[in-house]
Amino acid sequence: MAKETQVQGASITELTLNAYEYAYEQGWTDGLPIIPPSESLVQRFVAASRREAKETIAVLPPRKGVTTVEVIAVNAVMSGCLPEYMPIIIAAVEALSDATFPLELIQVTTNPMTPLLLLNGPIRNQLDINYGAGCLGPGWRANATIGRAIRLILINGGGALPGIYSKSSFGSPLRFAYVLGENEEENPWTSFHTDQGFEPDDNTVTVFRATNYVNISGGEGVGPDEILRHIATAMPPMYLGGEGAMLLLGVNHAQSLFEAGLSKQEIKQKLWEYSVVAEDHFAADFVATERAAGRTGPGVVRRTRLAEQMYVVVAGGPGPQDVYISADMPQTRLIQA
């Protein structure tokens, strides 16, 4: 993708189709149609970043691809992004390339793990990033295309082509895009980014290592302890389950728990206490592995080692719904918008 390629067509439609076919043949796409990254479009995206085109943002594994602002712009164009999304994507790539984040493992493992992006701050409303009803579903350009841009960057910058460097046994639909904002407007507690030491008006992106999506229905009209016990049943210990678990707490249950007087820390503590399974339910090798990782208690295996590794984020729209995601190793970056 470093060199310019001329694609021809007798009409705009034919040109677009030819560009898609050529990009697909080169292995530059996620399988979906792309916007041809013309020189003028790429320049607009670079300008929107307020960074130099040749500035290196990251060197991405496993191919050790030098990922410049220009490379990010090319992939953002192909993904269908708006130029205004560039600062978010750059901040996310910086977070992904942090030395403590296991990006190389994510890129090459047989596990379908993938980056999950959480947005906080006024930028959510400024760029129409969905944090309410349907925030993890279709229909929002920002959520869909920012997530897609990250995937294309990991393919074209890092070389994570399925079956070549990427060895994920099944893959995952979450690898197309996994992006949401926190519903700060209906969050009765402090937001995720302020818990990390940022100001409420700061715009941030947090990248997690994530592997799944489990919707949890029910728990309406019961007390706070019953709500949390119900949620915890969907958060059992996992083999090599990582160092964290995220609860996307729906607005209904968030309000119920807040009105019952529970703090976010108390919610984390209770989830940690309830998300356990008796040791004798598992094979001895599993228990030994989890004990070595510090995720056991007296006669039980725990979902996480510490209560602080239960990440609670308020998101979504009305309804008795919550989401559990196996997510850990968060990296938060300030968005230089």
Image: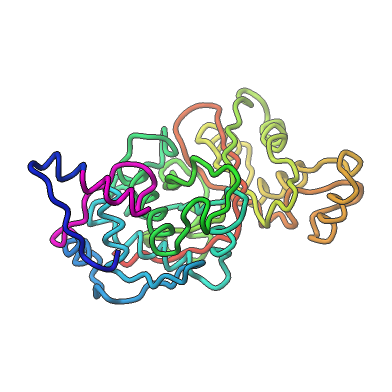
Residue 36 belongs to the span the image colors magenta: yes
- Is 166 situated left or right of 42 in this image? right
- In front: 226, or 120? 120
| Above or below 167: residue 229 | above
Image quarter in which the N terminus is found: bottom left
- Is 187 situated left or right of 281 in this image? left
Residue 187 is situated, as x and y percent measured from the top left of the image, at 48, 44
Q: Which residues are magenta?
A: 18-41
At horizontal 40% and vertical 66% (from top left) the residue drawn is 334
| Above or below 55: residue 106 | above
Residue 78 is situated, as x and y percent measured from the top left of the image, at 27, 52
- In front: 242, or 245? 242
Coloring applied to the structure = rainbow
Residue 223 belongs to the span the image colors magenta: no
At horizontal 80% and vertical 60% (from top left) the residue drawn is 294
Image quarter in which the C terminus is found: bottom left
Residue 232 is situated, as x and y percent measured from the top left of the image, at 70, 38
Q: How many marks?
A: 0
At horizontal 68% and vertical 35% (from top left) the residue drawn is 234
At horizontal 23% and vertical 52% (from top left) the residue drawn is 82
